[in-house]
Amino acid sequence: MITNATEYEKAQIELRDLQSRLESIQRDHPIGEKGFTKAGIRKLIARLNEELAVFEGSEEARTTSPG
């Protein structure tokens, strides 16, 4: 669970890395190959998006100055 702005920044970086990895696997392996790997990465992306959304709606996010 993301509890502060530093963890939020790290989660955003991790999300970008996972999205990049997924794009690379999709490009290098046609449909039907590496299905479990792609599904696992999608699951991690979904979890991070959910955690980011929860933090963005939290009081901590509203009281932390941007940047």
Image (tube, rainbow, N blue to C red):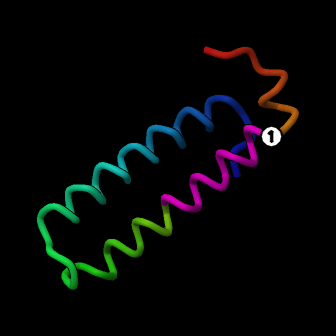
Q: Residue at x 88, y 33 (%)?
A: 59
Q: Which residues are magenta?
A: 45-57
- 47 is within the stretch colored magenta: yes
Q: Residue at x 75, y 48 (%)?
A: 54
Relative side of 28 to 62, left or right:
left
- Residue 39 vs 58, above or below: the answer is below
Q: Residue at x 33, y 72 (%)?
A: 38
- Residue 10 vs 25, above or below: the answer is above
Relative side of 22 to 43, left or right:
left
Image spot of residue 56 (x, y percent): 73, 38
- Residue furthest bottom as drawn: 32
- Residue furthest right as drawn: 59
Residue placed under numbered mark 1 in the picture: 57
> Is the residue marked by circle 1 packed among few (<14), some (14-19), or many (20+) residues within 10 Å?
few
Image spot of residue 16 (x, y percent): 40, 43
Question: Magenta region's main secondary structure?
Answer: helix
The quadrant where residue 41 appears: bottom left
Relative side of 7 to 62, left or right:
left
Query: Please, what secondary structure does the residue beneath circle 1 have?
Result: loop
- 23 is within the stretch colored magenta: no
Which amino acid, by three-letter code, is at mark 1? Answer: Gly
Image spot of residue 57 (x, y percent): 80, 40
Q: How many marks?
A: 1
